[in-house]
Image (cartoon, rainbow, N blue to C red):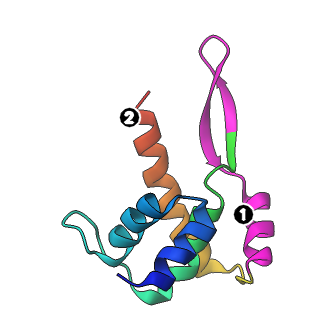
Amino acid sequence: MSEALIEDVMADTGADRAEATRIARSMTGADDVTIVLPVSERPTIQLALAVTGQWRMVPHGLGGSRPVALDMMAVDVTARWLGITPGPHLFEGLAIIEREALKTMRSRQ
């Protein structure tokens, strides 16, 4: 496992070393349940990790709320701060991640 990758994950996510190692193992397919994405998708993954808390929320139930979509304005600003040029390919990748994240979050409610 690359030490540089673990340190990048720690910097991008704020995770401790153990969690960053787990994430890095997943990103590289070093575990048995992860799909390995091409290196060309790293900006999409980096951006998705950086905007994990940037969800548009709607009221749900009594005083609760639920996520409905990533806040694309926040995504755009974050991408530019990270030096990632937004474009159609990036948007398509984030849309896939967004849909899967929403499915997961809804299944846990």
Q: In the rendering, which numbered label is found on residue 16?
A: none
Camera-side residue of 29 and 55: 29
Taking the image as shown, residue 19 lies to the left or right of residue 86, namely left
Q: Which sits earlier in the primary sequence, circle 2 or circle 1?
A: 1
In percent of the image, x 23 and y 68: which residue is there? Answer: 31
Camera-side residue of 32 and 89: 32
Q: Which residue lies furthest to the top in this view?
A: 62
Amino acid bearing label 1: Val
In percent of the image, x 61 and y 59: which residue is there? Answer: 14
In percent of the image, x 54 and y 62: which residue is there? Answer: 95
Residue 45 in sight in this render: no
Taking the image as shown, residue 82 lies to the left or right of residue 107, namely right
* Residue ID for mark 2: 107
Give, as a single range, the part of the protein colored magenta: 57-82
Q: In the rendering, which numbered label is found on residue 75?
A: 1
* Quadrant where the N terminus is found in the figure: bottom left
In percent of the image, x 40 and y 67: which residue is there? Answer: 21
Amino acid bearing label 2: Ser
The image position of residue 96, as x and y in percent, is: 47, 63
Taking the image as shown, residue 45 lies to the left or right of residue 88, namely left
Camera-side residue of 79 and 69: 79
Task: Work out whether 19 lies above or below 62.
Answer: below
Q: Does the magenta stretch include residue 65?
A: yes
The image position of residue 26, as x and y in percent, is: 34, 68
Q: Which quadrant would residue 43 be assigned to in this image?
A: bottom right
* Quadrant where the C terminus is found in the figure: top left
Q: Does the magenta stretch include residue 62?
A: yes
Q: Which quadrant would residue 103 be assigned to in this image?
A: top left
Task: Work out whether 47 lies above or below 88.
Answer: above
